[in-house]
Image (cartoon, coloured by chain):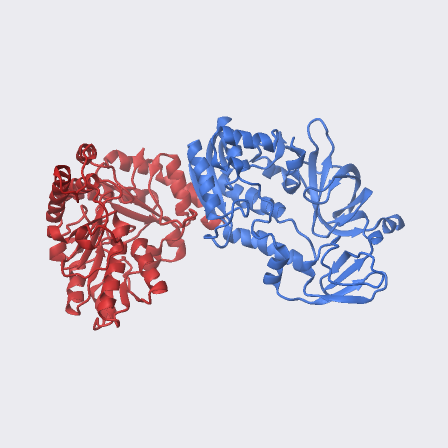
Chain colours: A blue, B red
Amino acid sequence: MRVLAAMSGGVDSAVAAALAVDAGHDVTGVHLALSPDRQMLRSGARGCCSVEDAHDARRVADELGIPFYVWDLADRFREDVVDDFVAEYAAGRTPNPCLRCNEKIKFSAVLDRAQALGFDAVVTGHHARLHEGELRRSVDAGKDQSYVLGVLRPDQLASAMFPLGSITKDRVREIAAERGFAVAGKPDSHDICFIPDGDTRGFLARTLGSRPGPVVDAATGATVGQHDGTYGFTVGQRKGLGVSVGDQRPRYVLGIEPVTRTVTIGTQDLTGIGEVRTGVPTWTGPAPALPLAAHVQLRAHGTPVPCEVLADDGGLRIVLAEEQRGVAPGQSAVLYEPDPARGDRVLGQAAVQTARERNETVRH
Amino acid sequence: MTYLDHAATTPMLPEVLATMTEQLGRVGNASSLHASGRAARRSAEQSRERLAEALGARPSEVVFTGGGTESDNLAVKGLFWARRQADSRRRRIVVSPAEHHAVLDSVEWLAKHDGADVTWLRVEPTGRITPDAFAEALGDGSDVAVASVMWANNEIGTVTDIAALAALAREVGVPLHTDAVQAVGQVPVDFGASGADALTMTGHKLGGPMGAGALLLRRDAECTPLLHGGGQERDVRSGTLDVAAIVGLAVATVASVNSREERAARLADLRGRLVAGVVAQVPDVQLNGAPLDDRIGGGPGRLPGNAHLSFPGAEGDALLMLLDARGIECSTGSACSAGVARPSHVLLATGADTDRARSSLRFSLGHTSTDDDVDAVLEVIGPVVERARRAGMNQR
């Protein structure tokens, strides 16, 4: 097949490209320039689109003897990922920009362009298994990235290749070292690539400016403080609330109301979530029959929880078998079919709209 | 492999390779006083004389450098510094926005860090600088430190009448530098007759080695050095002479200039067939730069091996990738340090819009080009353009 390897400059995508070459595919490497500031130089692990990263990707491509190009997707990335990220926070939600990037950039803008140019598939260094259209967790549970791929549709998965799903991250580094790739020891990236200093709150404050509002205690309804912007808060957050309530018990963010800019806080006993309601789901295969017993993962690197999935006015109602804390609107609820032998299978995902405590669930 | 990127670099001539290989085996610093040093110096000085003769310069006007970028930097910064030193009112640089980045970025550096004021020349839609535009920008010249206009454009191949501009500069006492990297060996270049004060040339565009070039610099031109040290090259460019590279540069320059007429005619024919063949398959293709048969100052108005084309609705980037996959090597405009394709600043300077600038490709023919190369492009260009158009402009 003629395949396009998206090469970030990191070790994963380097080895993914190498494995695609080994598998006999006709591989072309592409580095996606996503940063609005193309001269940005950052230290190794931070960011995904610096000049140094483009150089690292090019070095690997040259070693593999494959063509290499840089595609400028900075405008698309800003519109579809960065602006969306900011707008979601402004609306009181907590988005996952990596998921959005996979949905809108890597397996949409890049895939569309690749197909138009005559490529059959896009190869990435994601740690997830993809076999005959079935997307499953990586064999390396600690590095599994199936969560951020949960948003992909069957047509997108049909043109995707994830060569790393059946090997561990340690093995990826070994392969890179065996091949003499300079990126073999390059640290993993952890931060959001367009916030290289890791200060999401600072980024949002710079972007959105001061948008003050009240902090209200759920138990009394009393305003107990002021904040500079709801974007500084995520549901479930304990630290940095900047308020002191009389009884001195720790408070947690329970909810964010963007119109009145009200941040509601409460004691730990109020933070448990028994069910979530979502927007319209996407499925990795044919839509399953509902209700459905499955597992749900509510954030990247979160623990999957058994649940029952019901249809709910176009969206889903997901009833959790165990209470969860810190479930924020905007997060993706990714549904899995447990399969210890072949890896849990990703069924689909939907964005959380509301999360409720168990008591309310019972009343329904 | 079909190599149509000779303006980027062209294969070394066999006689250059042979001469350099021989020279590389010899010991000797051209600054040393013993026999080995004298032999090295003799080779270097013979090369200086031959190169000077081929380009209408005096041997003492040849300053060997590490290539075109260094020559451009030395001319622009060196002349600016020396002229301002002599008279602090001279802070203005008159320059074309269609110059190579080696000139543009030198000028912009001087503007940012050294108090230079920049007057950007008006560029014709062909990419040419007219004497009128030049005279207008010079004014009475009293506040101008240096002017720089390229002899032939590296992207679209347009030739400017440097002699006409040099005469105007001389009238108002302003030194004119010209980047002739693409012109030497392609069109007649006579430094003395042109009246320019400084001229940049380089080896690897005409069959010589990379990393070897020269600045032809009039004896009376004051130029502050960039490199200080042993005082080689009239004290303007210190550094041990790279004798093998200098020998190679001179052999290549002489060979290229001597064979220019015959080669230019042959390349112009091939280029004409290439453009006509592309037009036949892609009727809305746009030729950038001067017409193919354009004339200026008694010579060709466009480099004979240059075909610069815009394919509306297709991205140059996508075209290049698709052609590369089919064994055809050409180029788009410039890329930033991360490799992101930028719309050609040259086309933008000619008044082209961003879409036209982004949809362009440069085919540049050279001494090894053949009919087969043209056939290879014509065999695939139709489907390639069609596919690139499907991939769409800006992926939208």
Residue A221 x %, y %: 83, 65
Observer-nearest of B34 and B121:
B34
Residue A249 x %, y %: 83, 57
Left or right: where B67 falls relative to A199: left
Left or right: where B11 falls relative to A234: left
Residue extending furthest front? B34
What residue is at 11 percent from the left and 43 percent from the top? B46
Determine if residue B391 is in view: no
Residue B34 lies in what quarter of the image?
Answer: top left
The N terminus of chain B lies in which quarter of the figure?
Answer: top left
Observer-nearest of A32 and A160:
A32
Residue A128 x %, y %: 62, 34
Observer-nearest of A175 and B159:
A175
Give the total number of marks visible in the rendering.
Answer: 0
Q: Is residue B117 above or below residue A309?
A: below
Residue B64 x %, y %: 20, 48
